[in-house]
Image: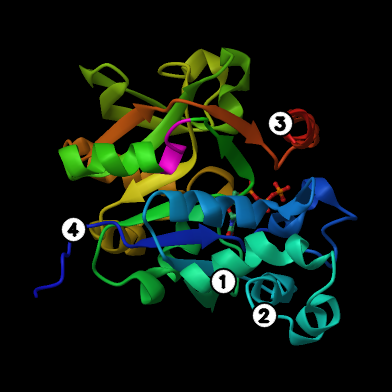
């Protein structure tokens, strides 16, 4: 049977950032491995990808991130120690994840921004549409996960999709901000977007959060993208090239999202998941 080149089969996790806001915790532990309750942020992300029907996880790591590879691997010594004891169930969730998925890794040698990290993932993704999860944006929804909702929308529009959320305008300088024309309830075809604008220059209060579905032409665009805001290669600048051709939909997702890259968001997420525990 011919391979379906349009189905979303892979999810890319850029996880090479320094996580400076969480120093000293992130000196030797990757930010993506910080736990909300007992589970690392990255595992929440991987489980969300699985819920969207994805089984191939592609992770962009960097120096000092080896704990990520060890986490998604079997620890024979540990397994042996707790086998048949009352503690065995603690490993059930991560075992399920490891059994269901394959993991591949590449390293971003220089941290030149999110756009650059995504470009580093090209070797793992190839020429097909793919999902991107920033694990420090933790999402939760009682129905379909945020990424499953986006995969459904992708099946309809067949172009890049970015998840957006309404934010207080004074926070616009922390996000990529989009504007466009409404296609249907919750879906907007983007006509313009700006990375981290001052509130007075923001085209709207719709902010891109850490969930994307990208068509593979993004890689060629990223190759040509010059460093932008903060001297980093910005995914927003590359998406704008697609958007100018009508190729990006902003999706107002259903569910909650916590910015676990900030202390406030991390504490909020911890309290939220503890309430659900
Ligand atoms: P952030 O800017 O939130 O992460 O990037 P950071 O740089 O690690 O955090 P601070 O500001 O220093 O505290 C968003 C996501 O993009 C990844 C990060 O790992 C994070 O998941 N990223 C960012 C890369 O993989 N490479 C980069 O060069 C930049």
Are discs 4 and 2 less than 8 Å apart at CB?
no
Q: Position of residue 121 (x, y in %)?
A: 43, 68
Q: Is residue 227 visible?
A: no
Residue carrying label 4? 6
State which tag comes first along the sequence, 1 or 4. 4
Q: Position of residue 55 (x, y in %)?
A: 41, 65
- Towards the viewer: 129 or 151: 151
Determine whether the residue tagged by mark 1 lies in a helix, strand or loop: helix
Q: CA distance from mark 4 to mark 3?
A: 36 Å
Residue carrying label 2? 74
Q: Residue at x 24, y 69 (%)?
A: 127
Q: Main secondary structure of the magenta part?
A: loop
State which tag comes first along the sequence, 2 or 3. 2
Q: Is mark 4 within 8 Å of ligand 1?
A: no
Determine whether the residue tagged by mark 4 lies in a helix, strand or loop: loop
| Residue furthest left in the image | 1
Q: CA distance from mark 2 to mark 1?
A: 8 Å
Residue carrying label 3? 276
Q: Which residues are magenta?
A: 143-147
Are discs 2 and 1 less than 8 Å apart at CB?
yes
> Is 47 rendered above or below residue 86?
above
Chosen colour scheme: rainbow
Residue carrying label 1? 98
State which tag comes first along the sequence, 4 or 3. 4
State which tag comes first along the sequence, 4 or 2. 4
Q: CA distance from mark 1 to mark 3?
A: 24 Å
Q: Position of residue 34 (x, y in %)?
A: 77, 54
Q: CA distance from mark 2 to mark 3?
A: 28 Å
Q: Nearer the viewer, mark 1 or mark 4?
A: 1
Residue 96 falls left or right of residue 194 = right
């Amino acid at each position: 049977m011919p391979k379906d080149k349009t189905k979303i089969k892979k999810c890319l996790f850029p996880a090479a950032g320094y996580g400076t806001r969480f120093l000293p915790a992130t000196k030797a532990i990757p930010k993506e491995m910080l736990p909300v309750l007992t589970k690392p942020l990255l595992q929440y992300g991987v489980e969300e990808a699985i819920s969207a029907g994805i089984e191939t996880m592609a992770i962009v790591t960097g120096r000092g991130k080896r704990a990520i590879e060890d986490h998604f691997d079997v620890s024979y010594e540990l397994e042996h120690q707790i086998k048949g004891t009352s503690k065995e169930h603690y490993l059930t969730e991560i075992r399920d994840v490891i059994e269901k998925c394959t993991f591949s890794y590449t390293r971003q040698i220089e941290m030149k921004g999110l756009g650059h990290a995504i470009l580093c993932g090209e070797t793992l993704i190839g020429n097909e549409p793919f999902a991107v999860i920033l694990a420090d944006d933790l999402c939760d929804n009682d129905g379909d996960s945020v990424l499953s909702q986006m995969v459904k929308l992708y099946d309809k529009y067949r172009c890049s999709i970015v998840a957006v959320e309404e934010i207080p305008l004074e926070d616009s300088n922390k996000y990529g901000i989009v504007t466009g024309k409404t296609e249907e309830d919750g879906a907007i075809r983007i006509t313009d977007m700006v990375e981290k604008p001052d509130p007075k220059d923001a085209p709207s209060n719709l902010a891109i959060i850490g969930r994307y579905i990208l068509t593979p032409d993004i890689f060629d665009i990223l190759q040509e993208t010059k460093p932008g805001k903060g001297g980093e290669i910005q995914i927003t600048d590359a998406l704008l090239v697609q958007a100018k051709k009508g190729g990006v939909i902003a999706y107002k997702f259903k569910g909650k999202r916590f910015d676990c890259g900030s202390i406030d968001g991390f504490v909020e997420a911890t309290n939220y998941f503890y309430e659900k525990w």
